[in-house]
Image (cartoon, grey):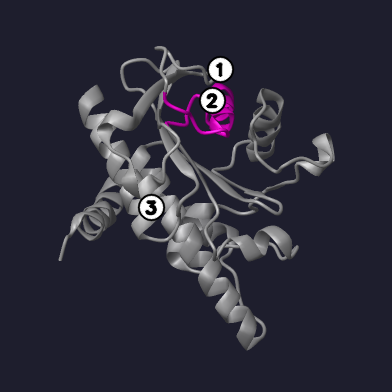
Amino acid sequence: MISLDTSIAELVLANRILAKEDVLDGFGHVSMRAPDDPNTYLLSRARAPELVEAKDIIRFTLDSVPVEATKERPYSERVLHGEIYKARPDVVAVCHHHAPTVLPFCISGTPLRPVMHLGSVIGDPVPMWDSRDEFGDTNLLVSKPEEGQSLARALGNSFVVLMRRHGATVAGRTLREVVFRCIYLAANARVQSAAAQLGAYETLSAGEIALAAEFNLQPHAVDRSWDRWVMRATSRG
């Protein structure tokens, strides 16, 4: 089992990587299920992801309550993490973001589809959650348990769910997998948008998606990308 200290260090790196790769900016957040207690999860205090440090990480129950009292302000949308962990025992990490390349698919009605090899990891179809369906007009934040539960239902057995007029939430069976999936979700969205400017374009077949995703999510592939992203996120050059 990976140690708690190592998990926290990797969670800090995940924040830095996703900021460096233009998935997270001043907003958005990434969490992981605690390695020593799967009924808790680790998430930073409310802070811009590229500034997150180990001391910022807070342990929460799956009801998204801090295990230990803290004066630090938590993210308003932490419940979406807790409710997904409740609904999906297989999920070890969750990221919510507003990547600019993904947002057009949250407002246009155009389905986001895997169109390239590495895009296979987003799955197909990518479900869409609309907060208005159950809650009417809101501030668009997933800040109430019932909103987090609704989002988790929309995610279902998938690993990506788009949020209409808002962004995306991505799940993974490891922290590195969720980072991989977030970055290639954004890349696939960018390529699909560019291809649409040229006219008709093809998507991957169901068989290609299954086979390519199985290959791309193997540790040797994920770790190779992770090592590069760590270098980019931590380089001072």
> Is residue 123 inside the magenta stretch?
no
Residue 70: image quadrant is top left
Q: CA distance from mark 1 to mark 3?
A: 25 Å
Q: Amino acid at mark 1?
A: Asp
User: Residue 185: x percent and y percent?
Assistant: 50, 58
User: Residue 52: x percent and y percent?
Assistant: 33, 41
Depth check: 202 or 159 in front?
Answer: 159
Which residue bears the numbered disc 2?
82
How many marks on residues?
3
Query: Residue at coordinates 42% horizontally, 57% vertically from top-left?
Result: 183
Q: CA distance from mark 3 to mark 2?
A: 20 Å
Q: Give whichever of discs 3 and 2 has the lower sequence position.
A: 3
Residue 102 sits above or below residue 30 on the image: below
> Is residue 75 inside the magenta stretch?
yes
Indicate which disc residue 133 carries. none
In the rendered image, the residue lying farthest to the front is: 71
C-beta proximity under 8 Å, tags 1 and 3: no
Q: Quadrant of the C terminus?
A: bottom left
Residue 173 sits above or below residue 83 on the image: below
C-beta proximity under 8 Å, tags 1 and 2: yes
Q: CA distance from mark 1 to mark 2?
A: 6 Å
Q: Amino acid at mark 3?
A: Leu
Indicate which disc residue 18 carries. 3
Magenta residues span: 72-92
Which residue bears the numbered disc 1?
63
- Element type where label 3 sits in the image: helix
Residue 113: image quadrant is bottom right
Q: Give whichever of discs 1 and 3 has the lower sequence position.
A: 3
Question: Taking the image as drawn, is residue 216 in sight?
Answer: no
